[in-house]
Amino acid sequence: MNVSKVGRRGQISIPRIIRQELNLQAGDRLAFIRRGDEFVLQPLKRTLSDFRGSVPVSAPQNFEAVRQQVLDRRGYRTLTDGS
């Protein structure tokens, strides 16, 4: 079992073996997904900005609303898939 301590400002250090297994680098983002009484950490290697321009649109888009929908669906899919 790997254990980490929460610091004064709520920060934690992810043990090296876990960072290596998840291929995490400084600056990478993690999603905290709730599963009942637990939270699962999921690396977010790509952002919505990575997909900018990949889909033609006819009007301005609210990217914050789109981003929230993606996060909600990803969390729901993770909960229902069990992965």
Image (cartoon, grey):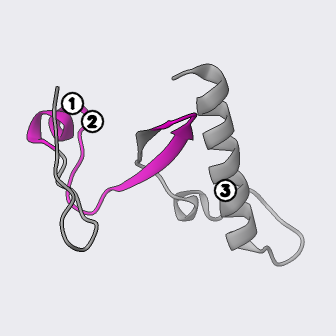
Cβ atoms at labels 2 and 1 below 8 Å apart? yes
- Cα separation between marks 1 and 3: 30 Å
Residue found at x 20% / y 59%: 26
Mark 1 packing: few (<14 Cα in 10 Å), some, or many (20+)?
A: few
Q: Earlier in the sequence, mark 3 or mark 2?
A: 2
Left or right: residue 18 versus residue 32 is left
Quadrant of res 73: top right
Mark 2 packing: few (<14 Cα in 10 Å), some, or many (20+)?
A: few
Q: Select label 3 or label 2 by which is in front.
A: 2
- Residue position marked by numbered label 1 in the rendering: 21
The reply to whether the magenta stretch includes residue 20 is yes
- Cα separation between marks 3 and 2: 27 Å
- Residue position marked by numbered label 2 in the rendering: 22
Where residue 69 appears, as percent x and y from the top left, is 73, 55
The reply to whether the magenta stretch includes residue 62 is no
Where residue 22 appears, as percent x and y from the top left, is 27, 35
In this picture, which residue range is highlighted in magenta?
15-38
**Quick one: which residue is furthest to the right in this view?**
58
Q: Earlier in the sequence, mark 1 or mark 3?
A: 1
**Quick one: which residue is furthest to the left in this view?**
16
Q: Amino acid at mark 2?
A: Leu
Q: Amino acid at mark 1?
A: Glu
Quadrant of res 81: top right
